[in-house]
Amino acid sequence: MIKLGSHVSMNGREMLLGSVEEALSYGASTFMVYTGAPQNTRRRPIEEMRIEDAKRRMREVGIDPADVVVHAPYIINLANPDPNKRDFAVSFLSEEVRRAEAIGASDIVLHPGSHVKQGVEEGIAYVIDSLNRVVEKTPGMQVRIALETMSGKGTELGRSFEELRRMLEGVEARDRFSVCFDTCHTHDAGYDVRDDFEGVMETFDAVIGLEKLTVFHLNDSKNERGANKDRHANLGKGYIGFERIRELVHDPRYAHIPKILETPYVTRDETAKKREFPPYKEEIEMLREGRYDDAFIERIRRRHLKE
Ligand code: FE
Ligand code: FE
Ligand code: ZN
């Protein structure tokens, strides 16, 4: 079975059970959740997340909780030069690791951090130190922290495989860490994802090691290769193209790795600013069947406006 899904929400009374239902409504076989709003750190206690109900439902429909991916909020910055803010980030991430472990997820994806202004060297040193402290605060946990490949916007760390390697080699408990490969981010960081994906993966293997790769984020990119921008596009609507993502999804070498769409919601019409409709049902279907429909955005609008 192809391990393919999207990020879904977790809120209301249904919490994780609602996440499972949302994933099923897209025809997904896995999913990714933020344990609350990605831009803040307000979280419900683990007991209110309805994890057991969600797991029961997953068993019914054949989703393995180990394929579920958690994403840490992107505002926590392990490289923050302010020690108090770094302490907060460490404590918060430790709580997130506990929540991910309770869900039974194999990986929690993390943006390694931004160095703000003290430079890459110091930034990476802070990240490593912070990660070691998170491991200390969460002894014996199975869930891995998957460092995400970043686009290099601003002062983001992890914009190259080499930077990620330094983090992975710098931490004490190496088996507690892995890597999430984001197709938009690596393309934006300058890797030739569109025309030389084989070469990119060979480089990944040489620098980091393919055994460390545990999550894919599937996104097209609104910007040219090397733009360091991080703006996701819907499948086939950007500079990477549908073919690359389709091949990746069907590549038997990566069959065991959960693949998660984070493409943007669709607007009501061309001029609307507000994004309202999830594209995942249509995108998952196109990837599964390997057939691209150029008019799928229109189709999504029609379907939702009729409902
Ligand atoms: Fe991310
Ligand atoms: Fe991502
Ligand atoms: Zn992104």
Image: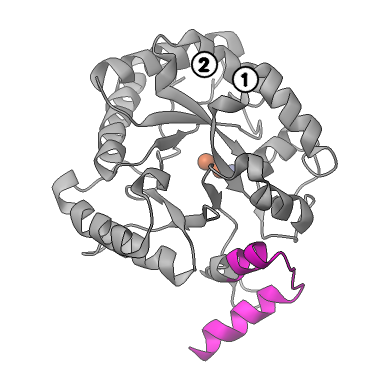
Which residue is at the front of the view, 284 or 110?
Answer: 284
Judging by the rendered image, the residue that carries numbered circle 1 is 208
| Residue found 30% across the figure and 42% down from its top | 104
Q: Mark 2 points at which residue?
A: 168
Task: Answer yes or no: is residue 65 visible.
Answer: yes
**Residue 79 rendering spot, x and y as whole percentages:** 46, 19
- Above or below, 108 against 2 in this view is above
| Magenta stretch in the rendered image | 282-307
In percent of width and height, residue 44 lies at: 21, 48
Q: Which residue lies furthest to the right in this view?
A: 195
Q: Is residue 156 visible from the viewing direction of this image?
A: no
Q: What residue type is labelled 2?
A: Leu
Above or below, 301 against 149 in this view is below
Picture residue at 29% right of the left edge, 31% below the top: 92
Colour logic: one colour
- Is 42 left, or right, of 165 in this rendering? left
